[in-house]
Image (spheres, rainbow, N blue to C red):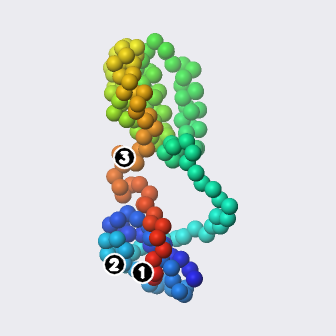
Amino acid sequence: MPIYEFYCSNCHTIYNFLSPKVDTSKCPSCPRCGKPELERQVSLFSISKGLQVEDEDGLPDIDEGKMEQAMQLMAKEGESLDEEDPRQAAQLMRKLYDKTGLSMGPGMEEAMSRLESGEDPDQIEEELGDILEDEDIFISSKRKWPKKLLPPSKDETLYDL
């Protein structure tokens, strides 16, 4: 029995539907909002026997290719960084966040803004140190993007077609 995937643009979710036979013409309604005729999605074929996927470190999903490129950029630009210029350090940090698709928490955003304005890094650390220690510096950029620009969520429930 085939499983078909359908996308609901109202819910921005992909749903799985089990069909008793191969049926490429039927389009179900959304199980959540009731929108008629969902969009059929191309499904990937996979075998997951023995596959174990765990997020052991608790970090958000980060594109490893983007992270590697960002680290190479930082290493290259870090060589010419004037350690006495807080503005350069802040610009480099912003590039890292931009290249990896992560966003800064409010404490880190304030620290970067203050560095960019030329404030003394030691003074910023003294005033914001506790906030920065407690803040998760790896905040997924999903919080900033409109829902429709993000990948759709996936409802793992298997519905009847």
Residue at 49% across, 45% down: 60
Ranked by sequence position, the earlier of labels 3 and 2 is 2
Instruction: Say whether marks 1 and 2 touch (CB < 8 Å).
Output: yes
Residue behind mark 2 = 36
Q: Residue flagged by tag 3: what amino acid is it?
A: Arg
Residue 104: which disc? none
Q: Position of residue 100 (x, y in %)?
A: 49, 40
Q: Residue flagged by tag 2: what amino acid is it?
A: Pro
The quarter in which the N terminus is drawn is bottom right
Q: Name the element at disc 1.
A: loop
Q: Is residue 105 left or right of residue 58?
A: left
Q: Position of residue 103 (x, y in %)?
A: 41, 39
Q: Name the element at disc 2.
A: loop
Ranked by sequence position, the earlier of labels 3 and 1 is 1
Residue at 40% across, 48% down: 142
Residue behind mark 3 = 143
Residue behind mark 1 = 27
Residue placed most toward the observer, 87 or 103: 103
Instruction: Say whether marks 3 and 1 touch (CB < 8 Å).
Output: no
* Looking at the image, residue 10 lies above or below residue 135: below
Q: Residue flagged by tag 1: what amino acid is it?
A: Cys
Q: Is residue 121 left or right of residue 75?
A: left
Q: Name the element at disc 3.
A: helix
Q: Position of residue 91 (x, y in %)?
A: 43, 26
